Image (cartoon, rainbow, N blue to C red):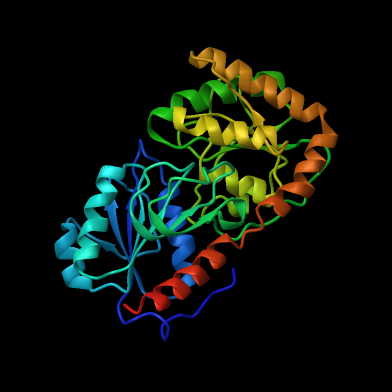
């Protein structure tokens, strides 16, 4: 990823990321913060809302209020990435009282708060109603790590399954069992522990991903993913994906990418775990048969999400913070 050295362009102090992350919230907001911090190339600190136990490359500020954290760090800018507007406003208001610029990061136009700059790199985002001085919308501003393009378009030999941990393990196991029953010849790679050894699924291996999905995606012929940041990463890498809405808020993202022909809606509105597993396996069957679609995703995915969204957002932060005269 191209880095932007901004230490002379922002006032002294780190970039403070206030991020929601945890077993139920997921870790997509955290991964976005890491990608944006890398693009900025400025010292950064991380304040977390939620019981996040995932490893991170950013130094974490433990258990302090917004006011105390701002007083202690005197950050150059605060970047808030939280799907709860009420929680975000606490930090935005505190930053305003300390004359610290605020950047807010959103999905699908949700949790909008007053900010200097709003960023929404979603596949679908509203054009109006933003209470921010400036807005960056659309896939060119999708903040993800630099993708590694897949090299495979042909027979499906390796399938990646990554739906997150916690309560998703049972769903992952059900999906893996059904896909393996239908396609015993396919190697299935899962990111959740405890899935390898699933009865009836002998060709299943578990992987640990300390550096994110990119290296594993690059070697996958097909993926089964949720509707969060990992789906954006897969499309940017050109990996054909059957997407599963882990929570209802992911459905618009999956529908948007499905409408664009860049992913398949694996579960739709199936409710039971058994029904979801069967629907997802049906989606895998269709994807395996549809070589033309998989080739399309390999070409069109990296064009739609080129991996430089973090760099574009970083440039905008530098420019707009400088224009405020507060830096």
Image quarter where the C terminus lies is: bottom left
**Residue 187 rendering spot, x and y as whole percentages:** 68, 35
Which of these two is toward me, 324 or 160?
Answer: 324
Relative side of 193 to 140, left or right:
left
Eyeballing the image, is 196 above or below 135? above
Q: Is residue 218 visible?
A: no
Front residue of 216/252: it is: 252
Image coordinates for residue 240, horizontal then vertical, percent: 71, 39
Residue drawn at 45 percent across, 74 percent down: 318
In the visual, does 65 lie left or right of 207?
left
Q: Position of residue 6 (x, y in %)?
A: 45, 80
x%, y% of residue 18?
A: 31, 57
Please say if 159 is above or below 44. above
At horizontal 48% and vertical 24% (from top left) the residue drawn is 171
For the question of whether residue 45 can be seen, the reply is yes
Query: Which of these two is toward me, 130 or 34?
Result: 130
Q: Is residue 262 left or right of residue 112?
A: right
Residue shown at 62%/18% (left/top)? Answer: 279
Q: Is residue 305 above or below residue 326?
A: above
Task: Write down the quadrant of residue 22 in the picture.
Answer: top left
Q: From this viewpoint, which residue is outermost toward the bottom? A: 8
Residue drawn where x is 73% and y is 54% of the image: 303
Left or right: where 147 falls relative to 9: right
For the N terminus, the quadrant is bottom right
Which one is nearer the viewer's eye here, 239 or 125? Answer: 125
């Amino acid at each position: 990823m191209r880095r932007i050295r901004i230490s002379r362009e922002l006032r002294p102090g780190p970039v403070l990321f206030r991020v929601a992350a945890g077993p139920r919230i997921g870790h997509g907001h955290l991964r976005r913060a890491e990608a944006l911090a890398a693009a900025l190339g400025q010292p950064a600190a991380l304040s977390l809302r939620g019981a996040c136990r995932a490893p991170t490359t950013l130094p974490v500020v433990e258990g302090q209020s917004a006011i105390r954290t701002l007083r202690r760090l005197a950050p150059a800018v605060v970047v808030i990435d939280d799907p709860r507007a009420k929680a975000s406003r606490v930090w935005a208001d505190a930053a305003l009282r300390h004359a610290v610029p605020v950047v807010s990061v959103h999905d699908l136009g949700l949790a909008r708060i007053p900010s200097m700059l709003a960023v929404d790199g979603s596949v679908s985002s509203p054009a109006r109603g933003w209470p921010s001085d400036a807005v960056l919308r659309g896939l060119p501003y999708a903040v993800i790590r630099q993708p590694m393009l897949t090299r495979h378009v042909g027979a499906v030999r390796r399938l990646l399954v990554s739906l997150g941990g916690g309560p998703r393990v049972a769903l992952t196991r059900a999906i893996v069992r059904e896909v393996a029953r239908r396609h015993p010849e396919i190697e299935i790679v899962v990111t959740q522990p405890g899935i390898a050894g699933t009865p009836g699924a002998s060709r299943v291996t578990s992987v640990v991903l300390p550096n994110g999905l990119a290296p594993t995606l690059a070697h996958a012929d097909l993926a089964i993913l949720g509707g969060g940041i990992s789906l954006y990463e897969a499309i940017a890498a050109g990996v054909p994906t059957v997407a599963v809405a882990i929570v209802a808020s992911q459905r618009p993202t999956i529908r948007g990418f499905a409408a664009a022909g860049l992913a398949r809606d694996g579960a739709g509105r199936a409710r039971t775990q058994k029904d979801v597993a069967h629907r997802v396996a049906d989606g895998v069957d269709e994807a395996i048969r549809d070589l033309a679609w998989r080739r399309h995703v390999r070409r069109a995915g990296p064009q739609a999400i080129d991996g430089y969204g973090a760099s574009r957002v970083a440039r905008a932060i530098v420019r707009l913070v400088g224009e405020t005269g507060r830096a």
